Image (tube, helix red, strand yellow):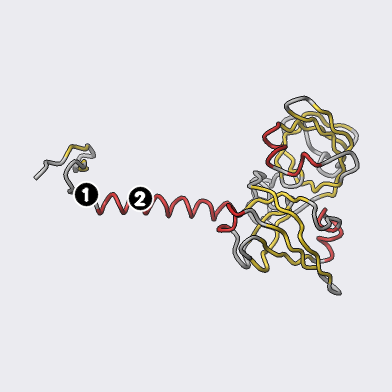
Amino acid sequence: MFTGIVEELGEVVAVEDLGDASRFRLRGPVVTDDAKHGDSIAVNGVCLTVVETGQGEFTADVMAETLSRSSLGALAPGSRVNLERPMALGGRLGGHLVQGHVDGTGTVVDRKSAEHWEIVKISLPEHLTRYVVEKGSITVDGISLTVVDAGPDFFTVSLIPTTLALTTLGIKQPGDPVNLEVDVIAKYVERMLAAGAVGAAGAAGAGEPGRTELRADGRTEPEAAE
């Protein structure tokens, strides 16, 4: 589990094509300081498993499924990436709960600069719109951000100078892809409400011919037809 607070702006050193996967070698002295084989590191919001570490770099294998569902497939040597280690148990939750499981990709649509901040507009896939609300949380390339405006096919975020200087959103331009992960709590709430609706419908239909009835001892038995 991550928090969406980027620890380091790293760099892709090499990309090796493995046929049905790719092996990335990335530079990140901060996140590799205590990393070892099997550890997790979020790369632009995608949770990857460390294969090897050494001299401030680490390698990670990325399967075809991840390459197709995220923007990692567009990375090349020299690309800058956001890096974060998992949150330690008992650590501060500076952003929000981030799984490192990308829900889809968006595209930077527009940027508007002000004196001390910048508004970035990002396209939003249709299947994710119901999870994005004004003042809610969303993860963009691994960065925990607050939604300013939620439209039918886009959302906007306001970026402070620190975020612009220390993450990839400072250099992303219109047309560039970004990884999106919506708030997992919203997905759980949706699932529970759906289950509740099904349960309520079942309760409303109790006593109808052909239905089963729950007995006091926990067993079920068919109801008698009238």
Circles 1 and 2 in contact, beta carbons < 8 Å? no
Q: Position of residue 6 (x, y in %)?
A: 77, 52
Residue 10 picture quarter:
top right
Is residue 167 rendered to the left or right of residue 226? right
On residue 127, the disc is none
Instruction: Tell me the crowding category of disc 1: few under 14, some 14 to 19, or many 20 or more residues within 10 angstroms, Cα based.
Output: some
Which is nearer the eye, 136 or 7? 136
The residue sitting at 74% across, 63% down in the picture is 121
Residue at far left of view:
226
The residue where tag 2 is placed is 198
Is residue 215 rendered to the left or right of residue 154? left
Residue 92 picture quarter:
bottom right
Q: Position of residue 169 (x, y in %)?
A: 81, 57
On residue 206, the disc is 1
Amino acid bearing label 1: Ala
Q: If the image is split into quadrants, where does the C terminus sit?
A: top left
Q: Return the disc, 1 or 2, that comes first in the chain's sequence.
A: 2
Which is nearer the eye, 47 or 191? 191
Badge 2 marks a residue whose secondary structure is helix
Residue 155 in the image: above or below residue 58: below
Residue 153 picture quarter:
bottom right
